[in-house]
Every structure is written in structure tokens, then in C-alpha cells.
Image (cartoon, coloured by chain):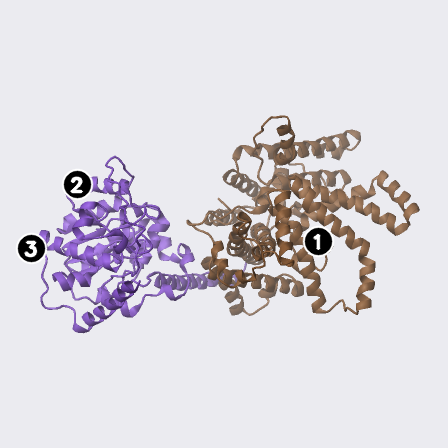
């Protein structure tokens, strides 16, 4: 083989690598989805006290703007689709770099979702939309850095350009990570998914729960686990086993755990399965999200009122608040029409 | 490890790197080592013993053959019988197990060696070649073992002849052309398997899996899609095998030559699974036609029915033997009764009516070279092939006939539902609209490559004559297409190659 031929091969491989990198960037951009949290980076420094992490149940279940308007608590919802505990942990660290976070609320579905599969973890990492250069994630995620550097190999099936791939820019700017859903589970679903059987247990992977707990302890941040309301066990993976195991864990470390699927918290928040769960039977709809947020607002003020700042003077400008009200009116109207 | 996995590519890269570092006379030893390692990783390791038995039988038989005499012929027959019996016992389970079932004995399916159907034919072909004096027996049994278990051809062939591979023991120098052509061929194989076959397979499996729900035009979709899936799957694996061998500087025989461009069924079988076709022609058809009793029969029939009819009748007997053998080689009676019989009847009808067809053509004023006539002939050949291949896909004859009934029923208005093609129903079959577009683009790409091959020889040779930016664009584009739209990775369990079963 001549020198020229060797150079040709090297040149071709270099072009190929660049093309792969380009595709990875597109892939990454697409996966950031409709909830990419760019808005978080626009928040002024040290103005966010509470953050939510978790999967779609988090971003559809807690409204930071409601928390702000009613209780004066400034928060941000970092929910992203299928977020694993690894991603939740990374988001918490990212948020704490920019903000003086006092409370981290974890939507508990993250825990059974975190089974440690490389593909799920990397998918979760890339769907979290963390700002800045994603190469730094390769350093965090040492197990499979190549997949992080060239995510196109692991995320290839997600590579498509359609309407659903991109976020609704206008809505997202006013909601601080909240994604409302306007549909009902309907009258058919009235029973709780939990049977309140203390004997049932399920294996849960606590690797990144432990890391998050230790991180919060180190930083003096209060950690809370919350499970949003769901309907029908046929489509959900949250059951007595998950509840009992997490209950055991939180009791061991003195962490509050609010499961809206138990009669105690459901009644306290005034949640009704048929009215407050969406038609997919997994997520809470906009009404459910407001009730859960209201409950959490009161809970936060009762228990951590001394450390949380009450934001009297709106840190948010009038345009943002008006935009938010307009969007929410649309969602409520949509729900009323059903 | 499958040959479409990242691990295989690493295995290959390491193998090629070491191969070209070694002195030429030792390169074949590395190939043997790689082949055994590959076998132990991919297949059940203990089944390697079957290959060793076959190799030993062939080695001793061919050693006797060189000495000549009556003992040589006996040794050759014994070696052929050992290979045939081993194959029948291990791969022909579906053929003999029913006999035991009749006697009330349940026998578990034995674990056969990987690529047994392929290396057994190679072994038998090699014995016969040595017996006929076409090849010289190998002195080194390890070289014979390499000929039988050379790893690229262990999954789905091709079925190589000794004279095609005998120079692989001489070693090779690193060549730019071998490296690039080999890599390009592997990439093309990946495209066929991961992008096309795996995607179309989802569609076909959904329809075949639920024939009561998916009838009418759905059956037509599966009817047309399965030949495409089989072609993409089988020829994709062959491309990977040929590309792999070329990286080591070894040229394996071609197994496909754009079969869907064929105008007749006869031509189709000269372009599809070519190595099996030439093997059966050389080792079954010609010996059958040349044997004494057939010669006598030929003379007798020529006297009785005339020269042409007599010859045709004898050819029909020879072809019948070939097709029955092909059916049996696939290992199940459904192949023999359905597929083989169907193609044999069609081929014979083609021979009988060839002259009349020519007359009809000239009466109707059909120009043989017109595009439309070529298209009609190709579609007709495809249809004939697709009907036969239904027996390949179905679990049994009943299912095959029921499926064909459904396909035919559409033509008489039963389950007439053409709207399923346009109303989004296709997305209920497990693939989305993006997948349908990918399939469409993939088929267009296959067609373009086939057309280039028809006109200019190998498509990649045509590409290699273009300007550098165009060449890089083509190969980078294909690579990205496979990376982005291939079905691989942790979320997918890429199916085995269909022909791996034989």
C-alpha cells in the first residue's frame, strides 16, 4: 500500500468521524425535546429555592409558577422524559452550581426507572437538555464515554425530525419546566393503584439515590420524595412493592416521602383519581398538578418556611406572568370542554 | 456475537491487523485460529467435533483417492456417507423425527454444527473433485480444516469449491483495493440486513403472525415484502462474508447477481444462491444425466417420442433430482413438497412451452428488447418466486395454502381493503411512517445498485471510478444511513440470518 493510499484512508476516516459528530449534535438537539430547560439558564443567580427532578410525571405534576404565585416560593421543574436517578442527580448538581437550592423534590417514579442499563442511562442523560458542552458528561459517565461522545450510536432510533421532537418555544418560556396535560382518566378509574399491603416488596436500585442523598446532606439541602397520582395498575409500574421499599428507605434516612396514591395524602390534597389523572392513566392532568402543587406549597412553608425565601417582589416580569396566565387559561378551558 | 455486531467488527479489525503483520506463509494459520475462535464464540463449542469428524473423514478418503484403485473409490463413498449421515442426523431432524413420533417416541432436536449444510456440501464437492481429478488432495489436514470452516462462510455460505480457495494458503500482502472493497462490501451487507431486512421483517412477522386480523391487502404486503426481506437478509450476510474474506485478500464466490432483474425463472435460479445452483448442477444434475441407466433411458425415449421430447424427459428427471435435493437440503418436507415441486413444475413448463411462447410473441408483435416487456417478464418471475417462497415462510403446508388462498382471494374481491395502504393502518404493524420511508429509500437504493451492476459490473467499481468527493459522499452517506436507521444496539435484538438455519 502506498503512502498516498494510507493518507486517503486516514482522510476518509476523519471525514466520517466529523459526519458522525455532526449527526450526534443533531441527535442531541432533537432529544432535548420540548422541555429542554434553556429557561433555567436565564434565571438570575440565587433566585431558585426549590427544584423538582424526575421523569414526565414530574414535569406534568408540579407547577413552579403556581408555587410562586400562591406561596411566593421560587422553584424550577427539571423533569425530562424517562429521567433516571443518574440524570436527576446530575441535574441537581447542575442547579446547585447556579442557584442556592434549599429543597430538592424527587418524583419517585425515577427510582424504579433506574435499573442501570447503559442505553437507558445515556438516553436519559441526553434527554435532560443540560446546557453547555455535552462532552463534559462523558467525564461524569465513565462507564461508556464513547456512547456519550458519539451518542448517535446509541440514540439512532430517536433521530427523526417531526413536530413532536421540538419543544413549543412559546409555552416553555413561561412555565419553568411545567408541561400541563388536559385530559381525564374518566369515571372508570376511581380505585387507588396501591392496595396498602405492607408485605409486598420490590427490588429498587438505590445507587444514585444514595449519591443524591449524600450530596444533599453535604450541601445542607432538604430532600423530599413525592409520587404523583396514577390510575390503573395495568399500565403503571408503581405498586405496593415500590412504595413499601421506598418508604423503608426514606424512614431509614429520615427523608419525607409523600405518595399521593395513598389515601392519606390523596385525601389531604383533595385529589380524585377520575378527575385529576390524565387519560393515559400515568400522569396527573393540569387540575391534579395544581392540587398537588398547592399541597406541596403548604407543606414546604409549614416545614421549611424558615429557610425558604418568600419572594414578594416578583422576580418574574409582568410579561412572563401574563404569558403564563394566558397559557393556563387555554389548558383549563380545554379540560372544561372535555 | 453476531456478524452485525460491534464486537464482530473489533474481532475482524484485530484479525486483519495481525494477519498482515505475519509472514505470508503463516497467515493461513492465523485464519484457522480465527475460524476456530469465531466458531467457539458464535456456536456451541462442542459441536466443533462434528467438523473435525467431517474433516478427518474427508482427509483420509482423499489420501486414499490419490493412491487410486478400488479402495480409493470405497474410501470416497465412505467419506461421503459419513458426511451425509452426520448431516441427516443433526440437520435433518424435521425429516426423521416424525417417524419416531409415529412409534410414540419423542426425540429432542440435536444441536447441529454451525454452517453444517454449507460445509457438508463443500466436503462432498471436494471429495468428488479429488476423485474426478479436478483437484489435488491437500497434504495438511489443518489446511483442509480451514477450507471447511473458514469463518466468513460459516453463517450462510457461500458454498465454495476447492479450486476457488486453494490459493488462500499462499498468503497476501496488504492491498488498498482489498481493504477498501472489503470494507465497502461489509457496509453494504450491514445496510441490507440492519436497515432493510430487519425493518421489513417486522412488517412480515406482524402479518404472518395474525392472518385472521391481517388479511386482504395485508396479505399482499407480506407476499411482496417477504421475498425482499429474504433477499436483503441472505444477500446481506453474503456481502458481509465476501467483504470479510476480501479484507484478508481472499475472494469467495458470488452468491447473488441482482436476481430480481431476471426475466425467467431459469435465469432467476442462475442469479439466486448461485453457489448452491452450481453445486447441484455439477455434482447432481450432470452425474445423473451422464450415468449409464439415464443414457439408456434417453436413447429409449428418443426412439419412442422423438429426439427433442426424449431429451426433455431425461432433463426433467435430472432436474427433479436437483430440486428434490435442494428441498431436502433445506431440511423439511414443506420445502420438498411445496417450494421444490413448484419451481420444478414451472421450469419444466417453461421448457415445454418455450417454442410456443416464441410464436405467440411474434404473432402479438412483442419486441423482446423493449423495457415494458422486460419489466413484465421480471414482474412475472418475481411473482412465481414469491408464490414458491410462501412455503419457505409458512410453518407448514396448510398455512402456506391458506395464505396463498388469502392472496388470491383479493383478486376476486374477498377482503378487499386497499385503503389500509394509505389510512395509517400500516403503522399498526409495528413500524412507523419514518420506517416506511426508510424501506422505500432502501429499495430504491437496492434497485439503483442492481441497475448499475447490470450495466457496469460491480456498483462499487463504478463508484471507484468517480471523483474523490463523490466517492466519499457515497460511502459516508451510506455509513450514516446505516448508523442512523439501522436496527442495532442495546434496545434491539437483531434477528439471526434466515439462512443461518441451514
User: Of the residues tagged 1 and 2, which is closer to the observer?
Assistant: 2
- Label annotation for residue B441: none
How many C-alpha atoms fall within 10 Å of the one at disc 2: few (<14), some, or many (≥20)? few
For numbered disc 3, what is the local secondary structure?
Answer: loop
Farthest-out residue, left: A306
Q: Which chain carries label 3?
A: A
* Residue A213 percent across, percent down from the top left: 19, 47
Q: Name the residue tied to disc 1.
A: B270
Q: Which of marks 2 and 3 is nearer the N terminus?
A: 2
In-image side of A171 versus B32 (left or right): left
In which quadrant is the C terminus of chain B drawn? top right
Front-most of residues A166 and A151: A166
Against A157, residue A196 (above or below) is above
- Label annotation for residue A251: 2
Q: Name the residue tied to disc 3.
A: A306
Farthest-out residue, bottom: A319
Question: In 3D space, how far apart are the residues under numbered discs 1 and 2 (Cα atoms)?
Answer: 74 Å
Against B52, residue A312 (above or below) is below
Residue at image position (40%, 54%) is A154
Give a yes or no on whether discs 1 and 2 share a subunit.
Answer: no
Front-most of residues B421 and A311: B421
User: Of the residues tagged 3 and 1, which is closer to the observer?
Assistant: 3
> Which of the chains is brown?
B
Amino acid at each position: 500500500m502506498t503512502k498516498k493510499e494510507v493518507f486517503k484512508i486516514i482522510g476518509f476516516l476523519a471525514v466520517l468521524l466529523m459526519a458522525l459528530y455532526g449527526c450526534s449534535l443533531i441527535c442531541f438537539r432533537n432529544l432535548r425535546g420540548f422541555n429542554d430547560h434553556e429557561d433555567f439558564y436565564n434565571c438570575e443567580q440565587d433566585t431558585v429555592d426549590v427544584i423538582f427532578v424526575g421523569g414526565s410525571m414530574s414535569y406534568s405534576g408540579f407547577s413552579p409558577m403556581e408555587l410562586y404565585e400562591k406561596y411566593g416560593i421560587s422553584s424550577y421543574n427539571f423533569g425530562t422524559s424517562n429521567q433516571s436517578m443518574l440524570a436527576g442527580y446530575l441535574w441537581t448538581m447542575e442547579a446547585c452550581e447556579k442557584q442556592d437550592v434549599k429543597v430538592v423534590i424527587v418524583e419517585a417514579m425515577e427510582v424504579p426507572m433506574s435499573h442501570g442499563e447503559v442505553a437507558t442511562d445515556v438516553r436519559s442523560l441526553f434527554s435532560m437538555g443540560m446546557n453547555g458542552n455535552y462532552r463534559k458528561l462523558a467525564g461524569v459517565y465513565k462507564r461508556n464515554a464513547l456512547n456519550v461522545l458519539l451518542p448517535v450510536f446509541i440514540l439512532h432510533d430517536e433521530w427523526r425530525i417531526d413536530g413532536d421532537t421540538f419543544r413549543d418555544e412559546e409555552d416553555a418560556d413561561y412555565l419553568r419546566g411545567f408541561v400541563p396535560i388536559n385530559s381525564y382518566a374518566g369515571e372508570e378509574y376511581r380505585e387507588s393503584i396501591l392496595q396498602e399491603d405492607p408485605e409486598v416488596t420490590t427490588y429498587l436500585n438505590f445507587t444514585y439515590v444514595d449519591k443524591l442523598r449524600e450530596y444533599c446532606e453535604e450541601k445542607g439541602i432538604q430532600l423530599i420524595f413525592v409520587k404523583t397520582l396514577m390510575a390503573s395498575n395495568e399500565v403503571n409500574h408503581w405498586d405496593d412493592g415500590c412504595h413499601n421499599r421506598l418508604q423503608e428507605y426514606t424512614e431509614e434516612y429520615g427523608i419525607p416521602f409523600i405518595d399521593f396514591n395513598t389515601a392519606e395524602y390523596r385525601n389531604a390534597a383533595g385529589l380524585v383519581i377520575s378527575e385529576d389523572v390524565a387519560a393515559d392513566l400515568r400522569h396527573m392532568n393540569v387540575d391534579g398538578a395544581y392540587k398537588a402543587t398547592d399541597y406541596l406549597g403548604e407543606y414546604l412553608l409549614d416545614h421549611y418556611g424558615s429557610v425558604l425565601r418568600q419572594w414578594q417582589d416578583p422576580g418574574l416580569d409582568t410579561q412572563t406572568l401574563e404569558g403564563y396566565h394566558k397559557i393556563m387559561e387555554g389548558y383549563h378551558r380545554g379540560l372544561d370542554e372535555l | 456475537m453476531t456478524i452485525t455486531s460491534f464486537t464482530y467488527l473489533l474481532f475482524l479489525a484485530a484479525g486483519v491487523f495481525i494477519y498482515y503483520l505475519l509472514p505470508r506463509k503463516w497467515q493461513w494459520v492465523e485464519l484457522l485460529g480465527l475460524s476456530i475462535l469465531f466458531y467457539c464464540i458464535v456456536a456451541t463449542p462442542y459441536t466443533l467435533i462434528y467438523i473435525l469428524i467431517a474433516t478427518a473423514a474427508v482427509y483420509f478418503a482423499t489420501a486414499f483417492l490419490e493412491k487410486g484403485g478400488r479402495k480409493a473409490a470405497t474410501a470416497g463413498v465412505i467419506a461421503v456417507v459419513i458426511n451425509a449421515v452426520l448431516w441427516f442426523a443433526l440437520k435433518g431432524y424435521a425429516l426423521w423425527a416424525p417417524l419416531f413420533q409415529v412409534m410414540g417416541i419423542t426425540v429432542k432436536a440435536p444441536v447441529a454444527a454451525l454452517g453444517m449444510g454449507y460445509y457438508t456440501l463443500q466436503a462432498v464437492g471436494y471429495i468428488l473433485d479429488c476423485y474426478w481429478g479436478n483437484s489435488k488432495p491437500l497434504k495438511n489436514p489443518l489446511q483442509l480444516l480451514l477450507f471447511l470452516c473458514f469463518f466468513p462462510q460459516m453463517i450462510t455460505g457461500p458454498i465454495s469449491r476447492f479450486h476457488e480457495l486453494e490459493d488462500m494458503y499462499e498468503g497476501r500482502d496488504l492491498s488498498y483495493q482489498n481493504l477498501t472493497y472489503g470494507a465497502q462490501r461489509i457496509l453494504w451487507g450491514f445496510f441490507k440486513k440492519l436497515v432493510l431486512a430487519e425493518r421489513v421483517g417486522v412488517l412480515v412477522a406482524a402479518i404472518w403472525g395474525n392472518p385472521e386480523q391481517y388479511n386482504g391487502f395485508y396479505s399482499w404486503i407480506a407476499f411482496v415484502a417477504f421475498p425482499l426481506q429474504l433477499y436483503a437478509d441472505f444477500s446481506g450476510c453474503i456481502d458481509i462474508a465476501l467483504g470479510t474474506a476480501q479484507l484478508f485478500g481472499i475472494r469467495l464466490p458470488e452468491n447473488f447477481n441482482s436476481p430480481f432483474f431476471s426475466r425467467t425463472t431459469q435465469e432467476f435460479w442462475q442469479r439466486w444462491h448461485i453457489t448452491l445452483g452450481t453445486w447441484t448442477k455439477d455434482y447432481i444434475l450432470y452425474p445423473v444425466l451422464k450415468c449409464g441407466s439415464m443414457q439408456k433411458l434417453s436413447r429409449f425415449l428418443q426412439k419412442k417420442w422423438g429426439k427433442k421430447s426424449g431429451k426433455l424427459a431425461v432433463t426433467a428427471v435430472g432436474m427433479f433430482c436437483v430440486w428434490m435435493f435442494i428441498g431436502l437440503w433445506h431440511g423439511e418436507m414443506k420445502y420438498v413438497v411445496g417450494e421444490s415441486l413448484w419451481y420444478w413444475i414451472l421450469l419444466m413448463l417453461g421448457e415445454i412451452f418455450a417454442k410456443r411462447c416464441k410464436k405467440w410473441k411474434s404473432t402479438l408483435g412483442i419486441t423482446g428488447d423493449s423495457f415494458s416487456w422486460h419489466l413484465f417478464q421480471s414482474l412475472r418471475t418475481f411473482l412465481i418466486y414469491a408464490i414458491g417462497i410462501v412455503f419457505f415462510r409458512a410453518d407448514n403446508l396448510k398455512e402456506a395454502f391458506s395464505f396463498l388462498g388469502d392472496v388470491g382471494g383479493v383478486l376476486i374481491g374477498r377482503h378487499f381493503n386497499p385503503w389500509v395502504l394509505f389510512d395509517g393502518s400500516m403503522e399498526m404493524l409495528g413500524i412507523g411512517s419514518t420506517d416506511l420511508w426508510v424501506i422505500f429509500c432502501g429499495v430504491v437504493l437496492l434497485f439503483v445498485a442492481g441497475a448499475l451492476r447490470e450495466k457496469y459490473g460491480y456498483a462499487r467499481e463504478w463508484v471507484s471510478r468517480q471523483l474523490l468527493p463523490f466517492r466519499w459522499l457515497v460511502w459516508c452517506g451510506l455509513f450514516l444511513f446505516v448508523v442512523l436507521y439501522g436496527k442495532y444496539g442495546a434496545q434491539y435484538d437483531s434477528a439471526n440470518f434466515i439462512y443461518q438455519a441451514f
